[in-house]
Image: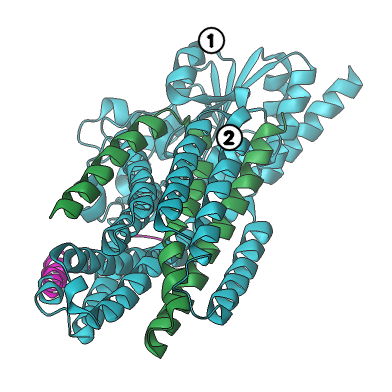
Amino acid sequence: MPQWIVNLAYLLASALFIFGLKLLSHPRTAVRGNLLGAVGMLIAIVVTLLDQRILRYDMILLGLVVGSAVGALLALKIHMTAMPQMVALLNGFGGAASLLVAGAALIEAQADPATLTGQFKVATAASGLIGAVTFWGSLVAFAKLQELIPGEAVVFRGQHLVNGLVLAISLALCGWVVARPEETAIYWGLAAAGSVLGVLATIPIGGADMPVVISLLNSYSGLAAAATGFVLNNNMLIIAGSLVGASGIILTRIMCHAMNRSLTNVLFGGFGAQPVSAASAESVYAGKVKATSPEEVAMLLETARRVVIVPGYGMAVSQAQHAVQALANLLKSRGTEVLYGIHPVAGRMPGHMNVLLAEADVPYEDLKEMEEINPLLKQTDVAIVIGANDVVNPLARTDPKSPIAGMPIIDVDQARTVVVIKRSLSPGFAGIPNPLFAAPNTLMLFADGKKAINEIIRSLQEATVAA
Amino acid sequence: MDTLIAAVTVFVLAMFVGFEVIVKVPPTLHTPLMSGSNAISGITIVGALLSAGLGHTTLTTVLGLLAVIFATINVVGGFLVTHRMLEMFRRK
């Protein structure tokens, strides 16, 4: 097939990627957008397979079969609650592919020194470094989210110094790859240094900061693909890679903004590593916390006209999304308005809560962003906080010295009554007490999220039957 | 040098297009956006297929094979899981 047809097909695939992402701007058109992206990918793969330079198809077939089987199995079996791990893993695989392709391209190019151009050499080094960092960083993120290793931030003395040193070594190896491209071993040395860097850069970030890490790794996986595009001089790879790179950068920025922290602070902060003193928690909570029962909450809900539900990571942990939806349906059938207030960093990845609630059949119109829900909370009878903590902590507004100072929060304290469903008074990821739990209009329901909601539903049904 | 500038031009312009298009994705779809864009970053499969098929050396063929596996997981897993999620959003 002449090269111009191949290039034209690549252009078509690139256009389909862009158009597909554009259709992701609305839940109604998003399915079609994703399919268009897949069609673009299929076109790109088929056209590449027709390349006359390909001598053997056995390895290609083997790779495609194994990869498709594993990919399909992962995609179909994964629970919606485990989606952050899944995305972390996929990010990593994209990085690994870039690392390997650039390595193979380097070895192929050594046979013909004329192909070792400046662009080729720099791009190969970049591909190798970003690919290795993405792969190992994503594996660490995956292990944290899957709880194979402790999820909290790992910090040690001299951490910044060690990380800086490894970064310097990695960059030096990049320079060495460019200077001596005929030595393949240097490239693998770079890959090893990048791997160490990926691990070290990810372990100090934990818990509620995971959305930032995943977004950032998402962006890296795209940039790695774009770098591979520079290696192979392939515009389609550059376009597709930079689209993903841009997407990850945007999400990273949104996540940081939603926590009122800079990216540097998230990456180097070791946030949440220092436990808060029990004394300060005691002074906030002493004698002011009111515990409640499912029956009492049901009574409150019976007369409520508007209820706002604010979910957090705890809802995912206790798999309470279906129970929450059942409660919302029951309330709606009694004429109560039920809305959901979703904080951008609730959960462990961007949009985590939305996916869980969509799985439970909650209509997306009911899911309100922070800016939309906040003005409505003053006219809300009951706000139910389930498994969220820092994102509803009023200290963000009132205490400039608090680690979450200036972070935009969902103003549940403005509602007439706040019901917080939580196992204990333990602090959230920021490690600080939450005065909301001691507020005069707050009732604490100490229980597992799913069980508590189911008991509220039962009490509410009994009350309905009795009436 | 000319090819480099041409490639950088494509890179920069594609970044701008990416920003313009993706800023409009609502927060409710941010997870599918991540998994879907992830599938797109599996585009390195194109380079992987060539490495696995050119038969240059045994080493490049093996590297190519591994890359094809990783990239295919990325592509197939990414598009499928995104489809699964988006179907849930569409139901209502």
Colour in which the image shows chain B: green
Q: Is residue A120 left or right of residue A433?
A: left
* Mark seen at residue A379: 1
Residue A427 coordinates in the image, percent (x, y): 41, 46
* Same chain for the residues under marks 1 and 2 in the image: yes
Q: Residue furthest front?
A: A2
- Quarter holding the C terminus of chain A? top right
Q: Is A147 displayed left or right of B7 in the figure?
A: right
Query: Residue A397's quadrant in the figure?
Result: top left
Residue A102 in percent (x, y) is at 31, 71
Disc number for residue A30: 2
User: Residue A101: where, in percent of width, then height?
Assistant: 36, 71
- Residue at x 16% of width, y 71% of height: A170
In the foreground, B28 or A93: A93
Q: Residue at x 47, y 66 (%)?
A: A51
Chain ID, mark 2: A
Q: How far, Cα to Cα, is label 1 from label 2?
A: 33 Å
Q: Amino acid at mark 1?
A: Gln
Q: Colour of chain A?
A: cyan
Q: Return the mark for residue A434.
A: none
Q: Is disc 2 surrounded by few (<14), some (14 to 19) or many (20+) residues within 10 Å?
A: many
A206 relative to A255, above or below: below
Chain letter for the residue marked with disc 1 in the picture: A
- Asked if residue A158 lies in the magenta stretch, the reply is yes
Residue B34: horizontal and vertical position, in percent? 47, 46
Type of amino acid under label 2: Ala
Magenta span contains residue A133:
no
Q: Secondary structure at mark 2?
A: helix
Q: Earlier in the sequence, mark 1 or mark 2?
A: 2
